[in-house]
Every structure is written in structure tokens, then in C-alpha cells.
Amino acid sequence: MYLVIVGIAALAGYIIGTLRIEGMDPELFGVLQLPPTAIGMALYGGITVGTLLGVLLVVMIVVSNRYADPDGGS
């Protein structure tokens, strides 16, 4: 499911990039300037959403492993 969501974000970025909207200057995490092309926007969408969802997924796994009841709640 993670890969599907990241793929949809990259596809949406690609579609937005093909529209050539003026003033579109994607910066990856405010550091790396990407070109305002379809590929640049696809990278921006995929990497940004992938990173944000990845961090949330890792936090969820860590919390689940740390606070899960090992004996099933008895």
C-alpha cells in the first residue's frame, strides 16, 4: 500500500509538471532545487510523500513493538 501511495504522488507530480504552471519551483526539503519539469515534479511528489509516510510508518512500528502487550492482554 505504501508503494501505491508513493506511486500515486509521483504520478500526480508528473501530471502537474506537464502543465508547466508559472512560478513552480520545487525545493526538496527546502534544500535541493529541482527543475520545474514533469520529472522534477514527479521526484518531488514521490520523495516527499514517501519520506513523510515512511517516518510515520517507522514511528508506528517502534511504538507498536515497544508498547504491545506480549501475552495478549490477560
Image (tube, rainbow, N blue to C red):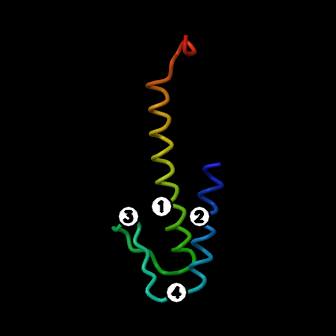
Mark nearer the N terminus (4 vs 1): 4
Instruction: Tell me if label 3 and label 2 are in contact, CB under 8 Å.
Output: no
Mark nearer the N terminus (2 vs 1): 2
In the rendered structure, which amino acid carries the disc numbered 4? Ile
The residue where tag 4 is placed is: 21
Helix, strand or loop for disc 1 = helix
The residue where tag 3 is placed is: 29
Q: Nearer the viewer, residue 49 or 69?
A: 69
Helix, strand or loop for disc 3 = loop
Instruction: Tell me if label 1 and label 3 are in contact, CB under 8 Å.
Output: yes
Instruction: Tell me if label 2 and label 1 are in contact, CB under 8 Å.
Output: yes
> Which mark, residue 23?
none
Compared to residue 72, the image places residue 49 above or below, namely: below
The residue where tag 1 is placed is: 48
Q: Residues within 10 Å of mark 1 (few under 14, many from 20)?
A: some
Mark nearer the N terminus (3 vs 4): 4
Residue at figure coordinates x 48%, y 26% from the top left? 65
